[in-house]
Amino acid sequence: MPPHPSSLSSPAYPPPSPLLHLPSQRRPCSFRSAIVSPQHLRKIQRSKLVATSSQSRDSRGYSVDGTSAILTLPSEVQEQSNCTVRVRYLAERIRVLPARDRVEFVGLLRRDGQMGSLSGVNDLLTALAVAREPDIALQVFDEMPSHGLVPDAWTFSSVIVCHCLKNSLDDATRILESMVKNELHPSVATFTTLVNSFCRKGEMQKAFEVLGVMNKVGCEPTIQTYNCLIKGLCYVGRVEEAYEMLENIKKGSISIKPDIYTYTAVMDGFCKVGRSPEAMELLDEALEAGLAPNVVTYNTMFNGYCKEGNPMKGFGVLKLMKERDCAPDHISYSTLIHGLLKWGKIRAALRAYKEMVGDGFEVEERMLNTLLRALCKISWKERDLLEDAYQMFEKMRSRGCVVDGSSYGFIIQTLSVGNRNEEALLNREHMMTMGHSPKMISLARVVRALCREGKLDKVLSVLMDERLGQPSKEAYNVVINEFNQQGRWLCARNVYGMALKQGVVPEKKPEDARGNVLANSQL
């Protein structure tokens, strides 16, 4: 009896994978519908079972003559009564193969007689669904008549999953309706698969129609089924209906109990429409009920607070997570830092960054550049943050992170503000060797800082260094003004002439010994 494909997959969140079991009873298939036509049945009756190959193989599973890479199950797997083991083995073998070899793999199984029984084919169909190869699975299904095999409920359940994977929900619905019509009772997992697929597309009316069919045939929905519906309602903005469904479950109107995924789905819906306080109330309620929120539940709150402009409340969520032994993940910290930066909470973003690094997470380059620029800008006024900006820049460089051109411009200005002008010039030169276009204001700030220090000779060398790019009008204005103030009128005239040769006309002009601005004829 093959397991339902989703029971072998990584659990999706939210909601958790609802596909847990196939139908509980095996029934002989007597399909006389659009799925299995009378002609199809006659073809099956005329067919013969494929004989099992008796060819000898070595320990690797190859034929003795080495001509065919047979991919049969090892004897220890073949002997397993639990078909879940066989399906897992097949699915893993399919996954590790290159995509181009998977069809050949199934062909080898076919030629080796592995499709000689209904249970073998059902195992293969389930494994292909788990490996997300619905096209190959449907091809195998179409070939069943030639092997003398009549599909049963397990077969069609796997086919429904494959159509859902292909997003062919009309075909999946047609098969489900035919199963019900022919008294091939689908499992709750099969129903839930289709419900979930409709919910993910936002087709809630069709999802509820499937729920109606479940009730009609006496198939009791599970909490996973309702989780899919709640998530779907939130997805299309019907949050109040989702909350009402949760309340009905809690009141016992529905004979199941909500799990943490139920709460998380409604919390996520509230957060997306700006109702984070109500989401937090649900989180508190879940905790009081003894449920254990996971990191995705808490990340929902980070998203909500940051979207609404209350990112500082994210620190409270971090504290709650650690008190509840739920370790924040990369998404937790990244969401919090992004929200803090978006709403101008730079010091808090730096704090979150340090905590993230302290917990062993790497921060992505794009966020590092954003944080560096924000930190540089605020440090020009709040000088106690200068060192933090320098350290972050150095850490990025030492880690080999890409520092973008805009970030280089900001750090050069920051180095100048902190009177680290030699480093500013070196980084400007490095910036240009990396192919970034220099920001003119960066050089102007460096020139102004050097002037304040009285290093006018260094200023002249900077203006003439072609590697540092063409100085801006602002840079020339600063230098000419400084030379005028120091009485170095000839130097001021030389700098003015240098600017004109570069096609720049400074607003500041050289002065004479009495402080009079020289006329154009005197320049």
Image (cartoon, rainbow, N blue to C red):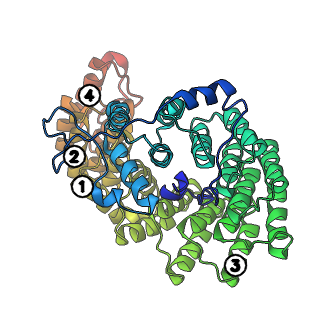
Disc 1: which residue:
399
Kind of residue at disc 3: Asp
Earlier-in-chain disc, 1 versus 3 = 3
Q: Position of residue 115 (x, y in %)?
A: 42, 40
Earlier-in-chain disc, 2 versus 1 = 2
Note whether 143 is above or below 280 in the view shown. Answer: above
Graded by Cα atoms within 10 Å as few (under 14), some (14 to 19) or many (20 or more), the crowding at tag 1 reads: few
Measured Cα–Cα span from mark 4 to mark 3: 73 Å
Query: Is disc 2 in contact with disc 1, using a CB cutoff of under 8 Å?
Result: no
Graded by Cα atoms within 10 Å as few (under 14), some (14 to 19) or many (20 or more), the crowding at tag 4 reads: many
Could you tell whether 420 is left or right of 99 in the image? left
Disc 2: which residue:
61
Query: Is disc 1 in contact with disc 4, using a CB cutoff of under 8 Å?
Result: no
Note whether 271 is above or below 263 in the view shown. Answer: above
Query: Is disc 4 in contact with disc 3, using a CB cutoff of under 8 Å?
Result: no
Measured Cα–Cα span from mark 1 to mark 4: 46 Å
Kind of residue at disc 1: Arg
Quadrant in the picture for the C terminus: top left
Q: Position of residue 29 (x, y in %)?
A: 65, 43
Kind of residue at disc 2: Gly
Q: Callout 2: helix, strand or loop?
A: loop
Measured Cα–Cα span from mark 2 to mark 1: 47 Å
Mark sitting on residue 493: 4
Q: Callout 4: helix, strand or loop?
A: helix
Earlier-in-chain disc, 4 versus 2 = 2
Mark sitting on residue 478: none
Disc 3: which residue:
284
Measured Cα–Cα span from mark 4 to mark 2: 88 Å
Q: Marks 1 and 3: which is nearer the front?
A: 3
Q: Callout 3: helix, strand or loop?
A: helix
